[in-house]
Amino acid sequence: MNTPNVSQQTEDAVLAVLAGQPVPDIAARTGIAPEELGDAVALYQAAGRAALAGRAARLDWYQVRIEFPDWSRCEAAAALLAQRLADAEGGGLVGAWWFVRKAPQWRLRALPGPHGPDRLRNVFAGTLDALVEQRTITSWWPTVYEPEVPTFGGPAAMDIAHALFHADSVHVLAHIQNAEPPTGRRELSVLLLSALFRGAGLEWFEQGHVWSMVSRLRTLPTDITTAQLAELGDGLRTLMNVDPSPLLAPGGTLGAVAPWLDAFETAGRALGEAAAAGTLERGLRQVLGHHVIFHWNRLGLTARTQALIAHAATQTVMNPPSALTRGRNPNQGV
């Protein structure tokens, strides 16, 4: 029997089961083992649910691509756009929104507000056309958004991701506009991601595993020496272990970024709970690793900086010779 006939026979058998016929009867009639038929039915249902979830997400989100006249100045233009979006969000015209950088464009995604998708599209058209006339942006056009649902752990986890994407995008663009930011982007990123990991309930070496997975996606530049990596790692270790609470209090050095950190910790906690409940459809650390990459994209860290952080953080957790030589327990904070 050739493969196409077997495939069609299996599909017909699955459809018969879904129509209400008993599995043993269908298995006996088709010659398919009951266990194999049961697995095929479960797989068919899972694929259908995933397809429906993906289609629903695509229908809800509106995406535009935006080109800038000068890539090096795109953040200033995006900051102006963020102000318009904040006004529209406050007026109920736009719901959650977020962006990714895909040179030479940014991709902006948004959910409609209470006034519906037509008002959302009108807001985007009016805002972006005005920015074209001002030569703040070169052009824009709508495209289809395809959420990476399996990558981020399934439909429920994708909702968690979208909530974090929105909060992160808002705070990134606010940080960009701050003439005197409380800390650098690299240091801020490590604080945020550490809050994400801790929120998810990861222990020290589990966090190191996430950094290790990310480091495999970001090649270390050949001009970086072991000594330079170790020096950076010492600084990162402090950031990865510090209790930021005193700095986050009103009037504290990092008081302005407290809601930002809270968004990361909240997302981590939700993902950790989903993993514990068995509703996360991918490994928790794998999902967190992709959140690292997407966050770095929004924050605008260069590939070099991303590689430095990932490799230094991995070494800090997994192979900390400086901590050992000073008699410090590598499982304890600095």
Image (cartoon, helix red, strand yellow):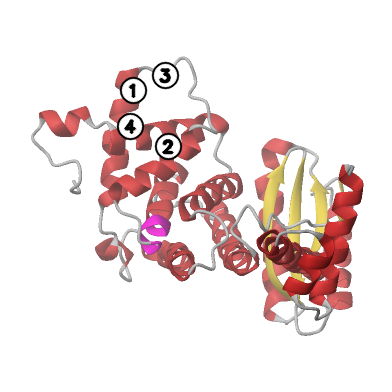
Lower sequence index among marks 2 and 4? 2
* Residue at the image position 80 percent from the left and 81 percent from the top: 20
Indicate which disc, 2 or 3, sits on the residue closer to the N terminus.
2
Residue at mark 3 = 224
Q: Which residue: 40% across, 47% down?
A: 190
Q: Residue under label 1, please give it.
A: 228
What amino acid type is highlighted by mark number 1?
Gln
Q: Earlier in the sequence, mark 1 or mark 2?
A: 2
Q: Are marks 3 and 1 in contact (CB under 8 Å)?
A: yes
Residue 212 — which label? 2
- The magenta span reads 195-200
Q: CA distance from mark 4 to mark 1?
A: 12 Å
Query: Label 2: how many residues lie within 10 Å, few (<14), some (14-19) or many (20+)?
Result: many
Tag in front: 4 or 1: 4
The CA span between labels 2 and 4 is: 9 Å
The percent coordinates of residue 42 (x first, y second) are 69, 66
For mark 4, what is the residue? 315
Query: Do the numbered discs 4 and 3 sit on residues whose CB atoms are within 8 Å?
Result: no
Estimate the spatial distance between the alpha carbons at disc 4 and disc 3, rounded to whole Å.
14 Å
Viewer can see residue 140: no
Pointer 3 local density, CA inside 10 Å: few below 14, some 14–19, many at least 20 = few
